Amino acid sequence: KNEVEQSPQNLTAQEGEFITINCSYSVGISALHWLQQHPGGGIVSLFMLSSGKKKHGRLIATINIQEKHSSLHITASHPRDSAVYICAVRLDAGGTSYGKLTFGQGTILTVHP
Amino acid sequence: GAGVSQTPSNKVTEKGKYVELRCDPISGHTALYWYRQSLGQGPEFLIYFQGTGAADDSGLPNDRFFAVRPEGSVSTLKIQRTERGDSAVYLCASSLEGNADTQYFGPGTRLTVL
């Protein structure tokens, strides 16, 4: 079992729909990242969370540390949101933590006009 | 530079050959990471540099893989005796320091071993 699991693996939506992508992890972490990867490979960091909720434009990320779960929401989805969304965690190494990330397998999102 | 750059963007080589992949991090970033992403998978950690030293190389799959960062800036990932299974996108990321900072990713180098 992977340390970081995402669901769903594939998601298709119509423009305007509200989208949720889930991430569960099985280890202690010090931070969780949501990343966006467009065709061609470029990765952009969307959020870095250690607790609570963050919002940027139409994107909202939440994390529940006790339940070891995070969600990425996209409101009013648009075809340009089509990409792979990747959840990654920074493991809690007990005081020696650094930025090494462990990644989920990604969620392929396709938003149709 | 404006962001993390990687060269080449694509590399095709034959089984058994030696390849070098280069990463130019954002100026002033002391932490540098190499990751490998196989088709349809999330990236996997290879090695982390803090300054000139490899602070964690636990992700390197075997001794055919080696990476250097001699002056604490540019890094080179070296793969000897390439195998078809080495085919992947090799991603580099840098951050200001190796802790809670956001990592900035390069565009990757797509390596194909024939």
Image (spheres, rainbow, N blue to C red):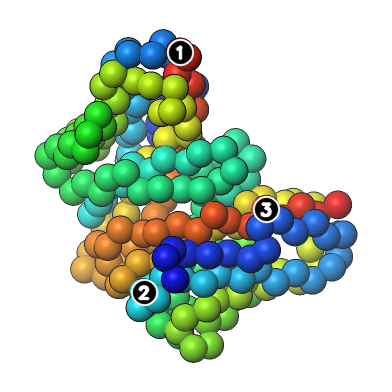
Image quadrant in which you'd find residue B95: bottom left
Query: Which residue is at 38% across, 43% downward?
Result: A35
The residue lying toward the viewer, choosing from A75 and A2, is A75
Q: Which residue is mark 1?
A: A113
Image quadrant in which you'd find residue B9: bottom right
* Mark 2 closeness class: few <14, some 14–19, many ≥20 residues within 10 Å: some
Circle 1: element type? loop
Whether residue A42 sits left or right of residue B62 in the image: it is left
Query: Which residue is at 30% across, 72% downward?
Result: B97
Q: Which residue is mark 3?
A: B110
Query: Which residue is at 47% across, 64% downward?
Result: B4
Whether residue B89 sits left or right of residue B14 in the image: it is left
Circle 3: element type? strand
Question: Are marks 3 and 1 in one subunit?
Answer: no
Query: Which residue is at 53% across, 88% downward?
Result: B70
Amino acid under label 3?
Arg
Q: Which mark is residue B29?
A: 2
Q: CA distance from mark 1 to mark 2?
A: 40 Å
Nearer the observer, disc 1 or disc 2? 1
Residue A21 picture location, percent across and down? 34, 26
Parent chain of label 2 = B
Amino acid under label 1?
Pro
